Image (cartoon, grey):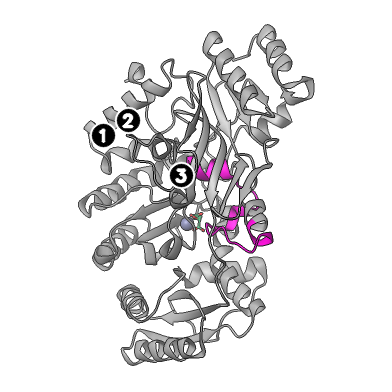
Amino acid sequence: MAIAASVIETLRGIVGDQRVLTDDVSFQQYGVDRTTIWQPAPGVVVLPGSTEEVQAIVQLANIENLAVVPSGGRTGLSGGAVATNGEIVIAMDRMNQVVDFNEVDRTVTVESGMITEQLQVFAEGKGLFYPVWFASTGSSQIGGNIATNAGGINVIRYGMTRNWVMGLKVVDGSGNIMELNRGLVKNNTGLDFRHLFIGSEGILGIITEATMRLTRPPQELSVLVLGVVDFPSIMGVLKTFNDGMDLTAFEFFTHNGMEKVVAHSGVPVPFETKAPFYALIEFEQTSEALLDKAMELFEACVMEGWVEDGVISQSLSQAENLWKLREDMSETLSRWKPYKNDISVNISRMPEFLAKVDVLVANEYPDFEVVWYGHIGDGNLHLNILKPDDLSVETFTARCSGVSKQVAALVQEFNGSVSAEHGVGLLKKDYLSYTRTETELQLMRQIKQVFDPNGIMNPGKLVDAVADT
Ligand code: 2HG
Ligand code: ZN
């Protein structure tokens, strides 16, 4: 659907000629995230330079009844930033500056188009630390992280993005500019709209600035990789280490996944003994005694028969190489256009849940290769089903969607979540009812209507507008 020339002219007037893109290359670039299922077809891409410009675009979209898709670093895995239907894509790339830093409050206010890694580097330059970390922090933007409440590899210690947001500036779907929470630690003045916008996937409005909390940097981090004999044993290892010391990460991956990463990235295998599963454990090595403690826990796991072999990092570069085995997994597997499940249950229910998922996957995908990995310390499993080269994306997706209903039913049985950290977007929308009740979904739609009465904000993602149900 083409956007009228007069609207394009008005947009040029708002952001400047060079910042309104209508060519196909830009549509391909800005109209998709990291999913490969949907064909991008936006009507126009606009790159605003200020909150007021975003406001003017949203006001225009309301007048013209045009849909808006907010676009950050487009590293999402659920189709939340996909534009397939002649929408106005508002790309935040130009709004990437630090607005304010306060060393007493330990907060930094940034424009929402700032790349996450830039925020991490900024914090480091101030002797501080922004702890939300995942493999795509070099491309993702802080606004997108907030809109999807991004998790990552340090959640066990630092929590999700939500924990670090002290304040937001947003333009809601009506075009109102609002400052939410003003960076305050304490502010008991009624409903906290900040938390509604965190994880809202662009359906209420657009985040234009964020005030983020920073913390002290960790001391030297030590990384252990252990070869584990089976699923239940991973949970034994988790409990042993969690009880024994404070961890900054507890991740896991399977041997077939690791082999692919080793072949793709050229990182060395951690040790020669082959194990079906590997646990990656990270902790802050604040003393020599803690290192001894880690060794003691490792030996206890060997004595239990859970662990066959292991290695502990002796240098920063070795720690980085061990991390690569886990972090490079998603990028390595992208060549197979995998179908992704991002599910979670309470940690206490994980062993029983894993056993059931294992049986389901073995029965339903006997002919597909499946790679398991994830943030097992958070109860979060990433199940990637690899597409055989000779199968079309459509056939493959249809097959996997069917099985995903069964996975979702299992998640429901265990009171878990069908999307632990990747959001809902288009990919998980049909599965949302396995985790949220119809009452909750209806309330979500009604809340959307409050902030976005004309239903222009990221339509079709997460939940439909009330009028469309
Ligand atoms: C990770 O944990 C990311 O590596 C991506 O959340 C997971 O691609 C995936 O399935
Ligand atoms: Zn993850």
Reading the image, the residue beneath label 2 is: 444
Does residue 14 lie above or below 83 as drawn?
A: above
Q: Are marks 2 and 3 in contact (CB under 8 Å)?
A: no
Mark 3, secondary structure of its residue: loop
Residue lying at 23% horizontally and 37% vertically, measured from the top left: 437
Disc 3 residue type?
Leu
Residue drawn at x 32%, y 78% is: 243
As helix, strand or loop, the secondary structure at mark 1 comes to helix
Give the residues in magenta: 123-147
Residue at the front extreme of this rendering: 104
Instruction: Residue type at mark 2: give it.
Output: Met
Residue annotated with mark 1:
440
Q: Is mark 1 within 8 Å of ligand 2?
A: no
- Quadrant for the C terminus in the image: top left
Which residue is the site of mark 3? Answer: 184
Question: Rounded to the nearest whole Å, what is the CA distance between mark 1 and mark 2?
Answer: 6 Å
Q: Residue at horizontal 49%, vertical 38%? A: 182
Circle 2 packing at 10 Å, graded few (<14), some (14-19), many (20+), is: many
